[in-house]
Image (cartoon, coloured by chain):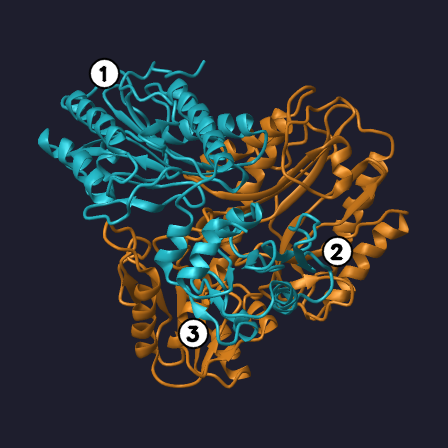
Chain colours: A orange, B cyan
Amino acid sequence: MDPRLLRLLDEASADTLVSADPGLVRMLTGHAGEIAFGPSPFQLPAIVVGGRASAAQLVCATDEAPEGDHVHGYPGFVVTALDPVGGARAALRSALGVAGPGRVLVDAAHVPLALADELPGATEAPAEALTRACAVKTDSEVAAVEAALRLCEAGHVAARSATAEGATELELWSAVTAAVEHAAGGRTTVMADLVSGPRTADVGGAPGTRRLEPSDLVLCDLVPRPDGIWGDSCATWAVETPPPGAEEMHRSCRAALTAGLDALRPGALAGDVDDVVRGAVRGDGFHYPHHTGHGVGFHWHEEPRIVPAGTAVLEPGMVVALEPGAYADGLGVRVECVAVVTEHEARLLSRHPLGLDPLDRGTVA
Amino acid sequence: MDPRLLRLLDEASADTLVSADPGLVRMLTGHAGEIAFGPSPFQLPAIVVGGRASAAQLVCATDEAPEGDHVHGYPGFVVTALDPVGGARAALRSALGVAGPGRVLVDAAHVPLALADELPGATEAPAEALTRACAVKTDSEVAAVEAALRLCEAGHVAARSATAEGATELELWSAVTAAVEHAAGGRTTVMADLVSGPRTADVGGAPGTRRLEPSDLVLCDLVPRPDGIWGDSCATWAVETPPPGAEEMHRSCRAALTAGLDALRPGALAGDVDDVVRGAVRGDGFHYPHHTGHGVGFHWHEEPRIVPAGTAVLEPGMVVALEPGAYADGLGVRVECVAVVTEHEARLLSRHPLGLDPLDRGTVA
């Protein structure tokens, strides 16, 4: 049994967890459900039933489920009448039967109301406890984050290669998706900010039709999800000549990122790491309105959240993205790397280029 | 008040509908929520509260909400402690207050269990009633589907242009996404099948690393969602020379599609339309294991479902995709068009190329 689930159940004096959060489903069953097309008319989201006595059980439509001992399937894509709720109810009942009797803890933010009748007397799981359960990764999960970060690199290199006066943000974005999906060998969800020029001052945004000008910055934050595990990465570069002020902002962010990576040690308090990074940028006369960082892997934003007064205590195995920024009138810079906390320090996992020079290719060939 | 909502409430003897289905949210509020990145740690899905006495109310995080009289927002992307459930509960309470007292009908497949306490005594909405409510479109909604179909065309033309011996499915796919997003002027969710060669026999699948061979078929089904409204489209073409049998299969599917479009008339029974199309293909000695078609717009698959013994009765304003296929050993063909049912017949909305000849560009420049 996963020790993270055991701890969660112990804390809540419960015997079984029921969640429809794709992150918890991935963590406890290995199943990476499709998330990119919204709710399906044919099925409910995949559900994990994690009990003390048995392996975690997966409840999902048979289209989605890998065959296996622990899968409770129901009809999905059919030409007959649709009844995903009825199917999911029966399959959940079957999974709860395997998990055995006891107190049920339910992830009520993700489990649909339609399943309430199968969960009489269930206790609502505290959201913080659920997200805390995902914070520490196993070695193979860290390796999966690293695989996602290799896609980040491919995307950043492609965006830089496509950077040229007159190119649109969307043209850079198309280069990103082509490179990421080629590197992944298949379709891959990528959340992203990709903005240029004055739009960089707005912290983020989706790529649009704006055409790059020689003195623009490009701010690119790529967050891919291969195999149900998220990576994260940000860099900011000039199209040709950095606009006035950009070099100072970029230097400040790079220094703050380095200081933050140094501060990622077991026992460190998230709020203290936030202070180090945010304070470094502020000391240079700059400012960012967002978090300093966050855990990443099962979700694109999870514990430990690196925020002012953040109470999370860093532990070995936590995977943390740090992303200091500096934003001014009509101008914004952000850099972001991911590291895993080890026994004594943190090991940098990111390798994408961070330079303001558009020709920087980092350590990628 | 939307007459489709009124009918739904009347049928259920209810006064207020609460749904977190993106399709119903789009229909009743116009809000096109983001669906592409799975559940957010910062917010619950957008929720519509539709009552008899007032305009439909939108419950969502302030990051997502357009400012407006009918929006009940709660904090989303914050650096302080996260509490999307608490925020959504309070905002839902506020929206229910505007809707006024009365019997609440809840879309329990989509509303999270965490909101149950705000919905005491609510009745679960029958799934068929919810999906039936979305079947008939207004003129402006039909125009929105047409806008989505223009993106389908751009994608199909791009995929055909990229078709060449040695190209990978993913290379065609990258051409599709670049063309669709360029035509849309922004990031756009596109669900898709894009398979080649023997993979076409499997009905569908995501693009992969397979390289095209001269005698391959390419089967491409593109389902984009600009502005919260889905389009749909399929075509099958040869890389160079169609493999033996492909022309007969393609001719059969084209003829069945034409017969199906002729059968789309007000008053027609979905099961009868299915018979016409499926029967035409079967009469040629071919077969497809999937639905003949479906409504499309608020969802990528909705009423009227064109399936064997389907009981939906066609009405003006229904937007229907028909997609006959023919699958054999190592070979598959499918063609799909979308039409809107009018007073006496159906008007074809699709314009993407359908020919087996890879150089077919349809009516698109």
Residue B16 image offset from top left, x and y in percent: 52, 63
Residue B302 image offset from top left, x and y in percent: 37, 47
Kindly indicate whether the residues beneath marks 2 and 1 are on one polypeptide chain. Answer: no
**The quadrant where residue A44 appears:** bottom left
Q: Is residue B265 above or below residue B159?
A: below
Name the residue tied to disc 3: A116
Left or right, A108 with reference to A77: right
Q: Nearer the viewer, residue B250 or A22?
A: B250
Name the residue tied to disc 1: B241
What's the distance in space between the residues labelled 2 and 3, CA to CA? 44 Å
Left or right, B96 with reference to B131: right
Are circles 2 and 1 on residues that touch, CB within 8 Å? no
Which of the image's four quarters has the C terminus of chain B?
Answer: top left
Residue B13 image offset from top left, x and y in percent: 43, 66
Going 36% across and 81% down the picture, which residue do you hit? A53
**Label 3 marks which chain's residue?**
A
Q: Secondary structure at mark 2?
A: helix
Going 48% across and 34% down the picture, which residue do you hit? B139
Is residue A27 something one can see in this rendering?
Answer: yes
Name the residue tied to disc 2: A260
The amino acid pointed to by label 1 is Thr
Going 20% across and 29% down the picture, which residue do you hit? B256
**Label 1 marks which chain's residue?**
B
**Label 2 marks which chain's residue?**
A
